[in-house]
Amino acid sequence: MKPEQVQQARQGQHDTDELAAVQRILQLHADEPGALLPILHDVQDALGYIPADAVPVIAEAQNLSRAEVHGVVTYYHHFRSQPAGRHVIQICRAEACQSMGADALLAHAELRLGCSAHGTTKDGAFTLEPAFCLGLCASSPAMTLDEQPYARMTAKGFDALVAQTEGGRA
C-alpha cells in the first residue's frame, strides 16, 4: 500500500470507531425523550469533540434534522466540531474577570500560542477557548489548563504554565 492509502485506512478505522461510540451513546439514551444535549455531552466526553459525520446519525436517532443538531453543536461554546489539542486552556470572559484584565490575558495568550480563541496551535499542543465564568470571580482573572483552575492569572504566570506544560514549548 502507498502511504496515503495506509493513512486513509487508518482514518477509516478511526471514523468507524467514533461512529461505534456514537451508536453506543445513542443506545444509552434511546428511551429518553429530548435527549439531544445529554447525547452531545456524552459524545464530546467520549471523543473530545462532535464529529461532523456523527451529526446525521444523531439527528436520525432523535428524529431531528441535521440542521437542528448542527445548530445546537455550533450554538454552545462547550461543544467542539474538531479535536482539541493535547492541552485545553480556558480563559474566563465573564464580567468580573474582564474587569480585572481577562481581555489582556486572552490577547496575550493568543499571541503567545499563535492561535485565536476557539483555535488550536499548529503543533496540536494547545487549544484556546473562552469560558463564561469559571467560578473564581473573587480571584480574577481566572483560567483553566486541562480543567485545573488558576486564579489571579498574569501574562507571566500564563507563560510559565505553558512552558511547564510542554517542557518549554511555546
Image: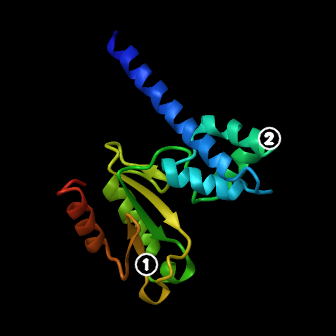
28 over 1 or under it: above or below: below
Q: Amino acid at mark 1?
A: Gly
Q: Which residue sits furthest left?
A: 168
Of the pair 7 and 24, the residue shown nearer to us: 24
Q: Is residue 126 left or right of residue 132?
A: left
Helix, strand or loop at disc 2? loop
| Quadrant of res 151 | bottom left
Q: Are marks 2 and 1 in contact (CB under 8 Å)?
A: no
Please determine whether, in this image, residue 121 is positioned above or below residue 160.
Answer: above
Q: Secondary structure at mark 1?
A: loop
Nearest the viewer among 73 and 9 is: 9
Where 35 sits versus 16, above or below? below
Of the two numbered discs 2 and 1 on the same chain, state the one appearing first in sequence.
Answer: 2
Q: Where residue 68 appears, x then y in whole percent?
A: 77, 46
Q: Residue at x 31, y 58 (%)?
A: 112
> Is residue 129 found left or right of 39 in the rendered image?
left
The circle on residue 101 is: 1
Q: Quadrant of the C terminus?
A: bottom left
Horizontal and vertical percent for residue 124? 35, 45
The mark closer to the camera, 2 or 1, is: 2
Examine the image and state in which quarter residue 7 appears.
top left
Q: Residue at x 49, y 47 (%)?
A: 47
Name of the residue lying farthest toward the top:
1
Residue 144 versus residue 52 in the image, above or below:
below
What numbered label is drawn on residue 85? none
Q: Where in the figure is residue 104, as x and y percent of width and height?
A: 41, 71
Give the residue drawn at x 52%, y 38%. Answer: 18
Q: Residues within 10 Å of mark 2 (few under 14, many from 20)?
A: some
**Of the numbered discs in the image, which one, if any, rests on residue 65?**
2
Please state the horizontal and vertical placement of residue 119, each as a whole percent of the image.
46, 50
- The figure's colour scheme reads rainbow
Quadrant placement of the N terminus: top left
